[in-house]
Image (tube, helix red, strand yellow):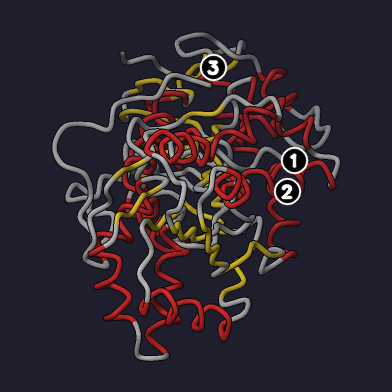
Amino acid sequence: MTNPVADGAGRGPSARGFVDAAFNEVLAGTRVLITAQRRAEDLSAALKRRGAHTVVAPSMGVEHHIDEASLLGRTRDLLDSPPDAVVVTTGIGLRAWLDAADTAGLSEALSEMLGATSTIARGPKAVGALRGAGADPAWVSPRASSHEILEHLLETGVAGRHVVIQCHGAGDDGLSEALREAGARVTPLTVYRWGPPPDADAVTNSIDELRAARFDAVAFTSSPGSAAWVSSLEAAKALGNVREQNLSGGLLLAAVGQVAAGPLVDAGFDVGCPERGRMGALVRYISTRITEDALTCVIPAGLLRVHATDAALGQRALGLAPGGLAVARLLASHPGRTVSREQILHVLPGDSTDPHAAEVAIARLREALASPASIRTVVRRGYLLVDAS
């Protein structure tokens, strides 16, 4: 896994969302694939504010309130006889539990019970949900790990204690069984389960675009979502292709934290994470990494960055066609050096040998840059991108 970059100075985003006062379009001309369903709109909006084009294709869906009658029955029992500890594994799970309780007029009582009970949070999202309900966790797993929670509970002693476990979408990672063996009375709560992707066609289309190297980055927010994405690539026989793009530096994989990155690392990918497991930090990390990794050069017109499907001059996406992008990439790979017409024809789509096709491509690129002086014609030899660095 790559070394994470710092979140940046100052405080993180507010609870209202990803607040970015600068609204700096550092991602102009880039495309980012979002594999999450929950808060995908917030994540997409934050990336768009920085200039990115986003595609949302959740690799799995969420099925809420699997058995609401049973959930509400257990909730009433817990309110009548509060447990000794409540383990909150996911923020989405706790919020869904509170939503279900609200339909029965129990949300206020449930919040009060959580505030008066020893609560354990598996990670920052669970912490945020607990605090939103008015409860401060008594203990938080440093690495958002169920195994850490089990070790903590066993160290503090659970014999004869009643422990409630809010299960995540794939279960409880064996917590219930291990705690029962240690003498605890355990009540597991299944609030939601992971299901198939809400839009299978969107996933298929995104994999086709991944094969064609049409994304600069892919964002992940949960371990199950990462695992489902890997499975989708395997089913489409695209895993090797996408992994090669990633390992060669052509595709950034960014996860909100190491737990979410786990299935990707296991599948052989190079994955980056922000230092803090927050969505806002993930957005900043993606912005930093894409701008650092892009093919970049300084020309008379300004800072030119070449991305997967377009290029940007400063904060302006150029809107290049595939041929223009190929020529821009070729020239930017050799700033200040002459590139022949034959080399340009070689990267253009099609099999043209007509030098006029190269001239037309250069003319269109100059027009897109709005800076004829940035590309110099070298008589009888070709063209060069003027290096102004």
Circle on res. 333: 3
Distance between the Cα atoms at labels 1 and 3? 23 Å
State the residue at coordinates (66%, 30%).
358
Tell me residue 345's x, y (percent): 72, 26
Tell me residue 237's x, y (percent): 86, 40
Residue indicated by mark 2: 207
Q: Are marks 2 and 1 in contact (CB under 8 Å)?
A: yes
Question: Height in image: 217 above or below 103?
Answer: above
Distance between the Cα atoms at labels 2 and 3? 28 Å
Tell me residue 44's x, y (percent): 43, 57
Left or right relative to 385: residue 199: right
* Amino acid type for the residue under numbered disc 1: Arg
- Upstream in the sequence, badge 2 or badge 3? 2
Q: Of the residues tagged 2 and 3, which is closer to the observer?
A: 2
Left or right relative to 84: residue 273: right
* Amino acid type for the residue under numbered disc 3: Ser
Residue indicated by mark 1: 211
> Can you say which quadrant of the picture contains the C terminus?
top left
